[in-house]
């Protein structure tokens, strides 16, 4: 059972600013409105639990939790399992956070990275008993409270009502001016020069010619020092304005802040229905509408980009088949064109139905990390990525999102994502390399993907 309360519609940024007065703000932001993908934004704060997995150790609020990482997470969520509640606009309570790309080395037999910066955990989820769902389509706001971590029914009800009162009062408080972050010119450093990246592309092509793989995603890692007093939330507001995306996210995780404007859903589970939406194929948009339409049409016809997309669809069909009922995996959209603020993408949709006895964390275990940002075959591609990139990807190309207490799941691929620790910002950008890849064009594609995020630091509001 959950308790809910309607509140007056509030712009989600204004709501986030009010909730940021509490610790652990989580903002799953539909900054680019869309009838189905970008309709509801979810906000939460003041978590009642913090799950972390790092260096082979799982913990809840600092206490060790035994078992493999996803089994440990499942055990921590088990006391708060709720039956699905039809009609709710969002999760009935949730763990919100991320799975870092490097978790893959704990789930599959792949090589560990040579160097790790240590900014992020392999898994970081905060447990939230009270959420705000903002429905952009209907213009409504609804608070949802579970009363956890109390488990006695009367104690749960009392806590839920208390939390609804407190959150409603906080959200109704007079607005305070939101501080602006002045534009900053950061000295971004990459772990690749242009020449080194183009050599890396050629190395992937040599692996393809040798028959090791069909494709691998190779990324640059950009890092820059932040000026004193840098405001991450003010930066995120700029990011969502310059690069709105259907799967935006802002997470305050106790010393590490994540700001993401991802366009790509990784996995969604509702009931037993699964959806993934891989992106392969990216071009920069043009300010001239006629030229922009030509660019979009050329992308939709591009044989290299279509072949790359279809290859990843096949990989994901195989991944989903590991946990979905036989015959249930379908591809309702193949190489569809989607347009964002600065970029056109080719996007496919793959769906399936979980087998009996399987849950959302089984799905993560069998499919993580996403095939669209590794390559095919996945495990060999991951080893080649580790060999060529050298640095751990950490959060980049992992997954950001929520695990509902009702067993639901919604996650995005962590691309167009900045990780900040108060001293440094890290952004990574990559692209899929195939036999048809042109090294210079692949390098430019990484810059195209990073450009909109760089602009959020550098352009005046």
Image (tube, rainbow, N blue to C red):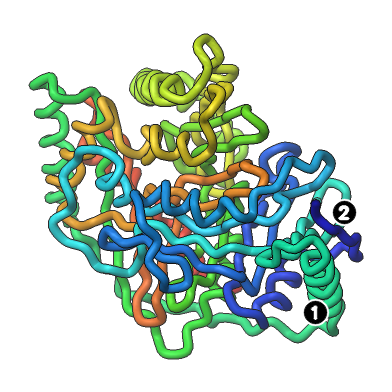
Quarter residue 160 falls in: bottom right
- State whether residue 215 is above or below residue 177: above
Residue at the limit of the structure toward the top, as seen here: 327
Q: Residues within 10 Å of mark 1 (few under 14, many from 20)?
A: some
Of pointers 1 and 2, the one earlier in the residue sequence: 2
Can you tell which of label 1 and label 2 is closer to the viewer?
Answer: 1
Where disc 1 sits, the SS reads helix
Across and down, in percent, residue 82 comes to 70, 47
| Alpha carbons under labels 1 and 2: distance apart | 19 Å
Q: Residue at x 78, y 56 (%)?
A: 134
Task: Identify the residue position indicated by label 1 in the image.
Answer: 170
Question: Which quadrant of the rendered structure holds the C terminus?
Answer: bottom right
Q: Is residue 428 left or right of residue 38?
A: left
Task: Identify the residue position indicated by label 2 in the image.
Answer: 139
Q: Residue at x 47, y 83 (%)?
A: 230
Q: Is residue 383 left or right of residue 96?
A: left
Where disc 2 sits, the SS reads loop
Across and down, in percent, residue 409 comes to 59, 43
Across and down, in percent, residue 151 comes to 70, 62
Across and down, in percent, residue 111 comes to 16, 44
| Residue 271 visible somewhere in the drawing | yes
Quarter residue 282 falls in: top left
């Amino acid at each position: 059972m959950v308790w809910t309360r309607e509140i007056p519609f509030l712009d989600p940024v204004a709501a986030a600013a009010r909730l940021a007065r509490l610790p652990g703000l989580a903002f799953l932001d539909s900054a680019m409105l869309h009838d189905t993908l970008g309709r509801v934004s979810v906000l939460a704060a003041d978590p009642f639990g913090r799950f972390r997995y790092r260096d082979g150790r799982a913990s809840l609020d600092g206490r060790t939790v035994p078992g493999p990482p996803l089994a440990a997470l499942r055990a921590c969520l088990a006391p708060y399992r709720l039956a699905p509640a039809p009609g709710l606009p969002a999760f009935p309570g949730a763990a919100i956070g991320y799975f870092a790309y490097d978790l893959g080395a704990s789930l599959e037999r792949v090589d560990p990275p040579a160097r790790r910066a240590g900014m992020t955990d392999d898994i970081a989820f905060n447990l939230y008993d009270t959420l705000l769902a903002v429905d952009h389509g209907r213009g409504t706001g609804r608070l949802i409270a579970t009363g956890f971590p109390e488990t006695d029914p009367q104690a749960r009800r009392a806590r839920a009502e208390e939390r609804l009162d407190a959150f409603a009062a906080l959200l109704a408080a007079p607005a305070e001016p939101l501080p602006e972050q002045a534009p900053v010119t950061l000295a971004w450093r990459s772990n690749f020069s242009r020449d080194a990246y183009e050599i890396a592309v050629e190395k992937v092509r040599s692996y393809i010619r040798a028959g090791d793989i069909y494709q691998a995603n190779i990324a640059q890692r950009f890092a820059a020092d932040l000026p004193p007093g840098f405001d991450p939330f003010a930066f995120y507001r700029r990011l969502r304005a310059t690069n709105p995306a259907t799967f935006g996210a802002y997470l305050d995780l106790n010393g590490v802040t994540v700001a993401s404007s991802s366009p790509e859903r990784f996995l969604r589970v509702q009931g037993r229905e699964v959806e993934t939406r891989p992106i392969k194929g990216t071009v920069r948009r043009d300010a001239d509408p006629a030229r922009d339409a030509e660019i979009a049409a050329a992308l939709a016809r591009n044989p290299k980009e279509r072949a790359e997309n279809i290859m990843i669809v096949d990989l994901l069909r195989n991944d989903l088949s590991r946990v979905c009922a036989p015959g249930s995996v379908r591809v309702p959209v193949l190489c569809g064109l989607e347009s964002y603020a600065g970029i056109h993408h080719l996007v496919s949709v793959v769906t399936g139905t979980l087998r009996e006895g399987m849950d959302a964390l089984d799905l993560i275990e069998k499919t993580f990390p996403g095939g669209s940002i590794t390559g095919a075959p996945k495990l060999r591609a991951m080893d080649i990525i580790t060999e060529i990139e050298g640095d751990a990807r950490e959060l980049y190309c992992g997954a950001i999102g929520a695990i509902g207490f009702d067993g639901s799941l919604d996650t995005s691929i962590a691309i167009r994502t900045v990780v900040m620790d108060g001293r440094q910002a890290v952004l990574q950008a990559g692209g899929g390399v195939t036999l048809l890849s042109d090294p210079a064009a692949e390098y430019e594609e990484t810059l195209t993907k990073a450009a909109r995020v760089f602009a959020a630091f550098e352009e005046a509001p």
